[in-house]
Image: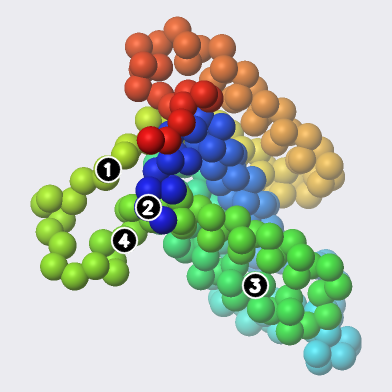
């Protein structure tokens, strides 16, 4: 499995896909977390009069918990931010996994209509991100491994480009501001798409002009 993962890491398209996947689910988590951090209702209605096994009543129970509701929000906010930094994405993916697997089973347990499809895809995406960072995590499951001698067999230079930190920061700030101002969801989506596109254009236009490019995976590179 490790050889397969390293094979994909040598493909430029796979690196870009992974970076933008972190942006996507990280921004979604940040956007949904802000309403909780400021102690507001998630769905905007009082669900106390709905059936006890309904989605609205469940969210009302969490909202009425107060501190716990805000704790959930800040946990999502931190997980999303760490994912979007790229530098700390592995830690973010671990935190994200613990949260999203709970959310997935909650949506299965209550009448969330099509939401389990969305949460299931997010869980699948997070699983992919953990597999992508398998080499960083494998020492947790191995015995008698010395951290002094621990070295990645393949480093990923695309992920370490400062450009992605800037784009991730922009997406994080945009998501927080749009949510705090309760702006229309479609405007937030368009703003994030534009920022992501700008980042990709800058990457495509400038990377060939840098000496750093000599160490980057290429589109036509294959595994041996």
Please report the residue visible at 48 percent of the width from the left and 41 percent of the height from the top: 8
Within 10 Å of disc 1 (Cα), the crowding (few <14, some 14-19, many 20+) is few
Residue bearing mark 1:
153
Secondary structure beneath disc 1? loop
Which mark lies nearer to you, 2 or 4?
2
The kind of secondary structure element at disc 4 is helix
Answer with mark 2 or mark 3, whichever residue precedes in sequence: 2
Residue with the mark numbered 4: 138
Q: CA distance from mark 3 to mark 1?
A: 35 Å
Image coordinates for residue 163, horizontal then vertical, percent: 48, 26
Q: Is residue 59 visible?
A: yes
The residue that mark 3 highlights is 103
For this view, does 51 lie left or right of residue 164? right
Q: Is residue 92 shown left or right of residue 224?
A: right
Q: Counting residues from the N terminus, which is met first, the one under dot 2 or under dot 4?
A: 2
Residue at coordinates 71% horizontally, 28% vertically from top-left? 194
- Residue 158's x, y, as percent? 43, 30
Disc 2 + disc 4, Cβ < 8 Å: yes
Q: Give the CA distance from mark 1 to mark 4.
A: 12 Å
The CA distance from mark 2 to mark 3 is 29 Å
Q: Which mark is residue 2?
A: 2
The quadrant of the picture occupied by the N terminus is bottom left
Q: Mark 3 Cα within 10 Å, few/some/many (few <14, many 20+)?
A: some
Badge 2: residue crowd in 10 Å (few <14, some 14–19, many ≥20): few
């Amino acid at each position: 499995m490790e050889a397969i993962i390293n094979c994909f890491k040598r493909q430029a398209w796979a690196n870009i896909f992974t970076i933008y996947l972190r942006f996507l689910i990280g921004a979604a988590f940040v956007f949904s977390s802000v309403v909780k951090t400021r102690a507001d209702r998630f769905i905007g209605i009082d669900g106390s009069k709905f059936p006890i096994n309904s989605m609205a009543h469940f969210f009302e129970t969490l909202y009425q918990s107060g501190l716990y509701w805000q704790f959930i929000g800040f946990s999502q906010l931190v997980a999303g931010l760490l994912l979007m930094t790229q530098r700390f994405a592995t830690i973010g993916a671990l935190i994200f996994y613990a949260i999203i697997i709970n959310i997935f089973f909650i949506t299965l347990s209550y009448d969330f209509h099509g939401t389990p499809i969305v949460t299931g895809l997010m869980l699948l995406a997070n699983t992919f991100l953990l597999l992508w960072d398998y080499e960083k995590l494998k020492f947790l499951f191995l015995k008698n491994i010395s951290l002094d001698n621990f070295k990645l067999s393949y480093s990923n230079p695309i992920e370490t480009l400062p450009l992605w930190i800037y784009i991730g920061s922009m997406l994080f700030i945009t998501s927080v501001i749009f949510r705090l101002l309760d702006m229309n969801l479609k405007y937030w989506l368009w703003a994030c798409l534009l920022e992501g596109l700008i980042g990709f254009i800058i990457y495509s236009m400038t990377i060939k002009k840098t000496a750093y490019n000599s160490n980057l995976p290429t589109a036509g590179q294959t595994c041996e």
